[in-house]
Image: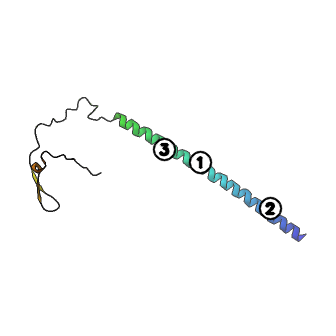
Amino acid sequence: MNDGSCADRIVRVSAGSEAQSGRLTIRRLRLRWLVAALALILIITGAAAFRARLSNSTSPATDQSYSGSELRGSAPDFRLVDQRDSSVQLSDFRGKGGGLGIPG
């Protein structure tokens, strides 16, 4: 009888731990879904706020009160020293195509 009752106890203990493990797994799944839902809500809310901020911002192209500065004539000539210690003058580039690169 001792063998039977000992085996019966082992079965009961393992069945109880499986049920406990199942409850923990369900809780973890619920927690994961809750975290995912909250993250999705935050993303949607942030995107909506960002979009509203963009639509409320004024840019020179859409703002009628923007007067800007009108460019007339050529730029004043100036001289700088480049990274090779050679002198470079703006008039050296007259008539050549150029671009302005702004690192960001």
Q: Mark 2, mark 1: which one is toward the viewer?
A: 1
Distance CA(mark 2)–CA(mark 1): 32 Å
Residue in the picture at 10% in, 38% down: 73
Which quadrant would the N terminus be assigned to in this image?
bottom right
Q: Residues within 10 Å of mark 1 (few under 14, many from 20)?
A: few
Mark earlier in primary sequence (3, 1):
1
Q: Is residue 5 left or right of residue 31?
A: right
Rendering coords of residue 61 (x, y %): 27, 33
Tell whether 94 sits left or right of 16: left
Mark 2 or 1, nearer chain start: 2
Q: Position of residue 98 (x, y in %)?
A: 19, 47
Q: Position of residue 92 (x, y in %)?
A: 11, 51
Identify the residue at horizontal 39%, vertical 36% (top origin).
52
Dots 3 and 2: beta carbons under 8 Å?
Answer: no
Q: Is residue 29 left or right of residue 44?
A: right
Per the rendering, the mark at residue 33 is 1
The three-letter code of the residue at mark 2 reads: Arg
Displayed quadrant of residue 4:
bottom right
| Residue 66 higher or lower than 14, as above or below | above
Residue beneath disc 2? 12
Residue at 37% across, 37% down:
53
> In the depicted view, which residue is nearer to us: 68 or 45?
68
Question: In the image, what residue type sits under mark 3?
Answer: Leu
Report the Cα–Cα distance between label 3 and label 1. Answer: 14 Å
Q: Is residue 56 above or below residue 92?
A: above
Secondary structure found at label 3:
helix
Dot 3 or dot 2, earlier in sequence: 2
Residue at 46% from the left image edge and 40% from the top image edge? 45
Looking at the image, the residue that sits furthest to the front is 96
Q: Residues within 10 Å of mark 3 (few under 14, many from 20)?
A: few
The circle drawn on residue 42 is 3
* Helix, strand or loop for disc 2: helix
